[in-house]
Structures are given as structure tokens and as C-alpha cells.
Image: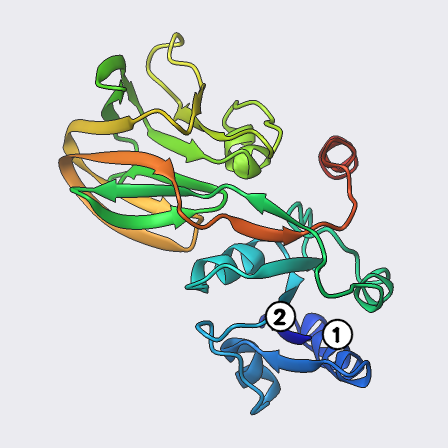
Amino acid sequence: MRIALVSRVDDPGALSYSRDLCDWVRSLGHEALFEPQTARALRSKNVWPFDRTVDLAIIVGGDGTILHTVQQMAIQIPIIGINWGEVGFLADLEPDEAKTFIQNLQPGFATEPRMRVALRSRGKILGEALNEALIVTSRPAKMLRFVIVIDGIEAERFRADGLLVSTPTGSTAYAMSAGGPIVDPRIQGFLLVPLAPYMLSSRPHLISNDRRVEICLESAKPASLVIDGQKTLDLGEEGSLTVGPAEQPALFVDAGKNFFRKVDRKLRRL
């Protein structure tokens, strides 16, 4: 197989582990390449440009490293994360179990598609998120006014510090901290979670991805859109966004880890 390796570049331990893992993967007869930042950090000439097809990407890091990698891919390829962060909810393997799993991985391995959400303005895609998109004021301590339109019908109008548009995968991240529910990642839908709404009646909504959802900004205050914590865009003071599923889901290698057991182990026992 042709395998790409991605590492946290701000952690010497992760880089050292990734270098050793690369040598070990090659000893099994696979081709191994490093993504550009990792290659520079390790001074390697074996570089994987994100537009080149590989069979698998192994990511050594926390959720931020995984989200960054997914954001960089023009075409989604199967990924498996090795946890080198704190919670590492998107990483299914721990460093001490990774080699056994990779060694037993055969071509044609199973993957679990994870829905990503696409945000558009005037038909143009602004970004695609695996975890969440955040609409927040550019001016601290100021509220925004939102109107939510579902299938052409105004469903809610509220003021809040911001609004999270979360995928089921992202329901255990920022959305959970903001009071949203934990959602089975197999659900085909997304969450709208108001951040510190002015009215307590403004509650999170779980919406099917086959509905047409529009988020309208009606505010005299500028807003920003943050995609997976990786990309920030200025939205200005007024406008609208449409929300729907991205054409390409993220592809996670099936590591045989039960989602609900992972919730219990990684979140409830911190």
C-alpha cells in the first residue's frame, strides 16, 4: 500500500514516533511518504502532496491535526488517527496498539464515512467542516441576530453570541460544551446550537440533511465564520448562508471501536 504519514509538528515526541513508524511501515513493504509540514520538520524528501492519491493516511496527533489534514485533502482518502493529544476523540488508536493494527490491515479494509457539512453563500462554497462551523461576532461582548429558515419557512428568530453548525461527529466537541446533545455519528443530519442565546427558549435543533436550511444574519455587527477551528472568513453585517452535506464525507478506517464505549471512556471518565 501507499501510505501517507502526518504528525503534530509542535511535539518532538510525536515527530520522533512518526519517523520510527515510517521506517517500520517501509520494513513491511509499503511505500511511505510524509505530508509537507511533517516532511519539513523531519527534513525528509519523501513528500506527499495532498492532491496525490494514497491508500491510507496515518495521523499522529490530536483532533486538531486530524481536522487540519481533512481540510487539506482535495479528495478524501481513508484516515486512521493515533492519539498524541489530550482527549483525541477522532483518533481511534493509542501509540502502543497502532503497529499491531496497521500490520493486520489488509487492502480492501472497511471504512466508516463521516458526514461533513458544507456552507455556501450565493451558491459559492465557503468551507466544509468535519466537526463544526462557528458563526460569531467579530466584536467581543456583542450579540448577533439570526433567522433560521427551513424548507422556505422561518423556523426561529433569536439573538445570541454566536451559532454553531455541528455535524454528528462534532457533537462531542464544541457543540457538547455549548449544551448540545451527543449524536450517533451514523445519523445523517446536523445540529444548530445557539451560543449564549438571549432567550432561554432558543434551544439546539437536530435537522435532517435532506432539508434546505438557510441561516440569515440581521445585525449591525460584523460576523466571522470559523471552519473546524482551521479557517476564518469575514461575513460582514448582513447576508445568508445555506447549509447542507458536503459531497465527500471524511473516511475513517474502521478500527472496531464502539462509539458509545468511546464516549464513556474518553468523555465521562476525564
Of mark 2 and mark 1, the one earlier in the sequence is: 2
Where is residue 8? Give x, y as percent.
60, 68
Instruction: Please give the label number shown on residue 86.
Output: none
**Mark 1: amino acid:** Tyr
Judging by the rendered image, the residue that carries numbered circle 2 is 7
Which residue is at a point 27% across and 19% down the rendered structure image? Answer: 151
Looking at the rendering, which quadrant does residue 259 occupy?
top right
Which residue is at a point 51% across and 36% down the rendered structure image? Answer: 174
| Image height of 135 relative to 154, above or below | below
Where is residue 251? Give x, y as percent.
58, 52
Q: Are marks 2 and 1 in contact (CB under 8 Å)?
A: yes
Structural distance between the alpha carbons of marks 2 and 1: 9 Å
Q: Say whether residue 138 is visible.
A: no
Q: Is residue 73 left or right of residue 125?
A: right
**Mark 2: amino acid:** Ser
Judging by the rendered image, the residue that carries numbered circle 1 is 17
Q: Residues within 10 Å of mark 2 (few under 14, many from 20)?
A: many
Name the secondary structure under disc 2: strand
Which image quadrant: the N terminus? bottom right
Where is residue 11? Give x, y as percent.
64, 70
Task: State the residue in front, 89 or 47.
Answer: 47
Which image quadrant: the C terminus? top right
Task: State the residue in front, 25 or 30.
Answer: 30
Q: Residues within 10 Å of mark 1 (few under 14, many from 20)?
A: some
